[in-house]
Amino acid sequence: MKDIYYADKRDIVKWGGIVYLCSKTGIKNVLQVAYYRRDKWPKLSFEKETIDLPEEVKKHFRDIKDISRLARRLSLKIKVISKEFKPETRTSYHRRLCKLTSAIKARKIVFLDPDVGLASNIAKAQHVKPDEINMIWETLSSRDFLVFYQHRFRFSNWVEKRRNQLAEACKVEIDRVRSWAAQPKAKQLPEDVVFFFIEK
């Protein structure tokens, strides 16, 4: 997730669904894998000067660890993996992640939050590959949940295409891959994302 995207309308749908899933299942532990990537922020034109946005302002509005305030309100434990994600080290990134998920013995939600979602062919920085999802899935314990962010792409049946691909990556039946999204035509919320979830 690029920091410039954090706290947009998609985060309302994202965390609304995760909080509801926690309340429905009694799960208190959420591990958000942010696939964090620093972005180059535009400058401001201030009178005749060109100035950088102050770091404090960026952190106030776009700090991915700020979700801890919500965690405190709801008595949840939300841990954000904010280590910078670099495509050239994606194998070691996912190996470390698997060690971390294996070490959490309490029932949990592991939320994979890339910028775009599942890779179809070539995996760019904004994607997660099917074999990487499978690695993480295999580290989960019974009754844990895997949650996955997916952005719309150019096919009309994009949700079903990715649902099938996710089921295949986790080697589960298609009906085990459930989802939530904003209601259609809800202008205040985006219709271009879906969140898939699977119970182990």
Image (cartoon, helix red, strand yellow):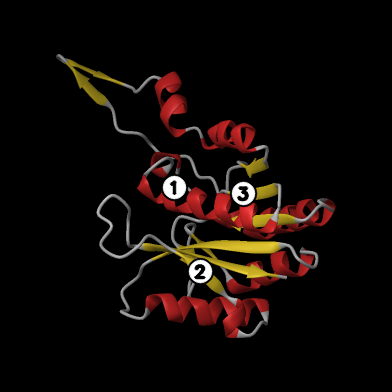
> In screen coordinates, is 75 left or right of 113?
right
Apparent side of residue 5 relative to residue 125 in the rendered image (left or right):
left
Q: Amino acid at mark 3?
A: Gln
Amino acid of disc 1? Asp
Q: Nearer the viewer, residue 158 or 134?
A: 158
Q: From this viewpoint, is residue 2 visible? A: yes
Residue 58 or residue 159, whichever sits in front: 159
Name the mark nearer the viewer: 1 or 2.
Answer: 2
Tag 3 residue: 32
Question: Residue drawn 36% across and 81% down?
Answer: 157
Q: Could you tell me which residue is drawn at 66 percent across and 82 percent down?
A: 172
Q: CA distance from mark 2 to mark 3?
A: 17 Å
1 or 2: tag closer to the N-terminus: 1
Q: Which residue is mark 1?
A: 11
* Rendered-image quadrant of the C terminus: bottom right
* Residue at the image point whose x is 60% and y is 33% from the top: 73
Image x and y of residue 111, in percent = 61, 56
Q: Looking at the rendered structure, which numbered label has been put on residue 179?
A: 2
From mark 1 to mark 3, how far is it between C-alphas? 12 Å
